[in-house]
Image (cartoon, rainbow, N blue to C red):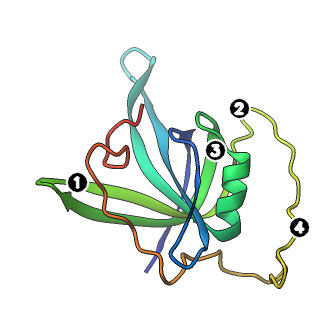
């Protein structure tokens, strides 16, 4: 069963286009989701440690993310939640990933102008497309290495 999650946060790394072994585009970036609570005693808002996510997008969503999003922007992400353990060079950790179904600017913090992309040759129309673009069959998550900005460490 896939858990669907919606997150708002700030891009901590810029989306860059990469390719799977079969040539399908994908992007991966880090998202920091702020965590605040109101202190009942003082009435002040207290900033807590943010939650960190690795966001993956494939095919046209990946290309659109690379063309539209920049490090530092506030965005909304909806997609399938995946939590996995990793171990490398004697270190272990937990990676929290979201395979994005939809990405967009958080309009609470600014404005944007939408431009519809021309459909790729032979692509199905957006009408009746039901499910989002899933990862290509040949795509496998790369092992997470400590210190690469994807191992729960702050990338800045």
Q: Are marks 2 and 1 in contact (CB under 8 Å)?
A: no
| Earlier sequence position, callout 3 versus callout 4 | 3
Of helix, strand and loop, which one carries label 3? strand
| Earlier sequence position, callout 1 versus callout 3 | 3
Of helix, strand and loop, which one carries label 2? loop
**Label 2 Cα crowd, 10 Å radius (few <14 / some 14-19 / many 20+):** few
Of helix, strand and loop, which one carries label 4? loop
| Earlier sequence position, callout 2 versus callout 3 | 3
Give the distance between the C-alpha atoms of the residues marked 3 and 4, in whole angstroms. Answer: 23 Å
Residue 20, image x and y in percent? 52, 72
Q: Which mark is residue 118?
A: 4
Of helix, strand and loop, which one carries label 1? strand
Up-down relation of residue 126 to residue 34 (above or below): below
The residue that mark 1 highlights is 93
Residue 108 relative to residue 85: left or right = right
Residue 91, image x and y in percent? 15, 52
In the image, what residue occupies the spot 45% across and 17% down? 44
Give the distance between the C-alpha atoms of the residues marked 2 and 3, in whole angstroms. Answer: 9 Å
In the rendered view of the protein, which quadrant contains the N terminus? bottom left
Residue 70, image x and y in percent? 64, 40
The residue that mark 3 highlights is 75
Give the distance between the C-alpha atoms of the residues marked 1 and 3, in whole angstroms. Answer: 26 Å
Give the distance between the C-alpha atoms of the residues marked 2 and 1, in whole angstroms. Answer: 33 Å
């Amino acid at each position: 069963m896939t858990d669907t999650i919606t997150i708002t946060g700030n891009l901590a790394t810029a989306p860059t286009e990469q390719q799977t072994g079969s040539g399908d585009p994908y992007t991966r970036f880090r998202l920091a989701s702020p965590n605040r609570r109101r202190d009942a005693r003082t009435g002040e808002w207290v900033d807590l440690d943010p939650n960190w996510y690795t966001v993956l997008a494939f095919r046209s969503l990946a290309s659109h993310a690379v063309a539209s999003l920049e490090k530092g922007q506030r965005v909304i992400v909806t997609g399938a939640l995946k939590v996995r353990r990793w171990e490398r060079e004697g270190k272990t950790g937990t990676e929290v990933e979201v395979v994005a179904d939809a990405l967009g600017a958080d309009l609470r913090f600014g404005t944007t102008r939408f431009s519809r992309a021309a459909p790729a040759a032979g692509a199905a129309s957006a009408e009746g497309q039901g499910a989002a673009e899933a990862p290509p069959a040949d795509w496998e998550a790369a092992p997470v290495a400590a210190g690469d900005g994807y191992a729960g460490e702050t990338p800045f």
